[in-house]
Amino acid sequence: MRYLHTMIRVGDLERSVDFYTRVLGFSEVKRSDYPDGKFTLVFLRAPGDPEGGPMLELTYNWGVDHYDHGTGYGHVAYQVESMEEVAKRLEAAGVGFSWGPGKTPDGRTTMAFVDDPDGYKIELLEYR
């Protein structure tokens, strides 16, 4: 068994793709429109992940601009090389951390959270 992707539904596809690619440095791997089902899928790869590795799938259901997250969703997490560099990219894009940076509960790792345009939580972890 191999982990493939995490899917989240987004209300404005281009705004979300811009956030993940321009702000966080992801690359767009594949985009597919499904006119019969009235949805578009965009698969993104995080910087540093290998080709064929796990991806983030953005699903845009045509005409739906908002989703309630419910209480079951927590966050997706990504390792970053430098929290300082991420902070600079976020600031340049007019985005800030929603929490942190600070230390993980065990005190050994720097962590922070940022919210994507739809309010999904992204945990960033800097291992040194």
Image: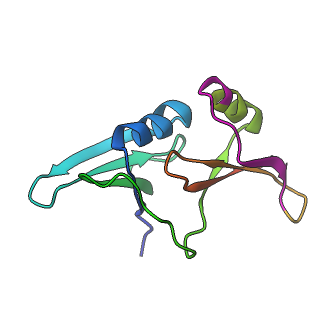
Q: Nearer the viewer, residue 29 or 36?
A: 36
Q: Nearer the viewer, residue 57 or 117?
A: 117
Q: Position of residue 33 (x, y in %)?
A: 18, 49
Q: Nearer the viewer, residue 25 or 98?
A: 98
Q: Is residue 71 above or below residue 31?
A: below
Q: Residue at x 55, y 56 (%)?
A: 120
Residue 10 seen in this snapshot: yes
Q: Position of residue 69 (x, y in %)?
A: 50, 66
Q: Position of residue 14 (x, y in %)?
A: 36, 37
The segment highlighted magenta reads 91-104
Q: Is residue 73 above or below residue 79?
A: below
Residue 126 seen in this snapshot: no
* Residue 102 located within the stretch drawn in magenta: yes
Q: Residue at x 43, y 42 (%)?
A: 16
In the image: residue 116, left or right of residue 16: right
In the image: residue 74, left or right of residue 43: right
Q: Residue at x 86, y 65 (%)?
A: 105
* Residue 5 located within the stretch drawn in magenta: no
Can you name the residue that lies furthest to the top here? 92
